[in-house]
Image (spheres, rainbow, N blue to C red):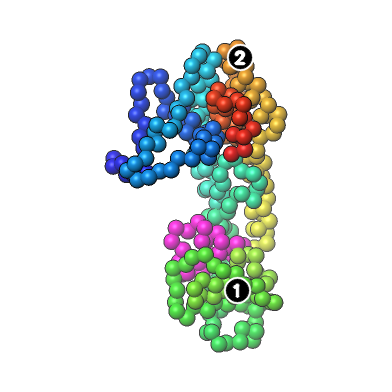
Amino acid sequence: MVAVTDMYFFHKFGKKISTYYILAYLNSKIMTFFFKERPIELHRHKSNVENDIPVFIPRNIPERILQSQIIKKEKQLTKKLPQMERIYRSRGFHFTIPIASEEDIEIDLQQFLRYVDCQTIEQLTRFIGGDIDIYNINRNDFPVLLINQKKINKLGAFKEIITESDVHFSYKSLKIIVNEAYYKKVKFVLESYIKFEEKPRFSKLLKLKVPSSKSLELIKTYKILLFRKISLLSSDDKQKIEEYIEEILNTANNSDSRFIDSASKILYFIDMAFVKMIAPKYKGEIMTY
């Protein structure tokens, strides 16, 4: 392994430190808060970031019990998140946990419409030269018009210009003119393709399916169902988790933690456990990050 200037190593020393504990600590909101409030400027060959990260080691029995719970939950999380990601990515959905609304769920259209019988952009398209009068073309037969005289193949993000009856998507000299009736569907295809394709190509774009109205309704329904499955925690859930942490810290009573079972609950438990141990007075400020 070669360490470049922006890579740092944690060396496991002794049996007291768990890599899962360190992982939870570095990814917790208290660490985000620490860096935001005490910004560390990294200079090549001169930074000494390891001396400015106070790794918190539990000091008494209740804190050690809480540490063991953090380690246990972090192990659960490192298994749970990749499993969830695989399941939903295979269905064409991408998101970051926790998510604020179903709008934060992104759709990989190519994956989602793999087995759906929809027309491709190529089937809906007529190639035209720059000077032809587009209004002489039957737009029911060709709702998408393409001008690509310079034969651009590598694609990037499109600019959008709305006219009276059409929407023009342009990238460099490439122009895709879309009938207003197909505007939302084609926009959805373009945005999904640019976002999820590693090397977007014009030739591949033409083969993509344009979703039907039924497909778009299905996507909307799936997004709502996904959001319900991975929703933010209720105030009752948060209160229950906080009471559990307080019980451990006050009585060293390691009661049943099986109710902390979802990814969102585990993340909140880890964040709040560190806050309660390290900086309980700053709970409000830290949890806003």
Numbered mark located on residue 250 in the image = 2
The quadrant the C terminus occupies is top right
Give the SS element for disc 2: helix
Asked if residue 241 lies left or right of residue 72, the reply is: right
Quadrant of residue 164 in the image? bottom right
Q: Which secondary structure type mostly characterizes the magenta part of the structure?
A: helix
CA distance separating discs 2 and 1 = 64 Å
Quadrant of residue 161 in the image? bottom right
Q: Magenta span has 200?
A: yes
How far across and how far down the image is residue 81, in percent? 52, 38
Is residue 255 visible in the rendered image? The answer is no
Q: Which residues are magenta?
A: 188-211
How far across and how far down the image is residue 192, in percent? 55, 59
Write the residue at 55% across / 51% down: 92
Residue 167 higher or lower than 28, as above or below: below
Q: Residues within 10 Å of mark 1 (few under 14, many from 20)?
A: many
Judged by depth in the image, the label closer to the viewer, 2 or 1, is 2
Type of the residue with mark 2: Asn
Give the SS element for disc 1: strand
Type of the residue with mark 1: His
Residue corresponding to mark 1: 168
Residue 77 higher or lower than 114, as above or below: above
The quadrant the N terminus occupies is top left
Asked if residue 35 lies left or right of residue 12, the reply is: right
Residue 9 higher or lower than 191, as above or below: above
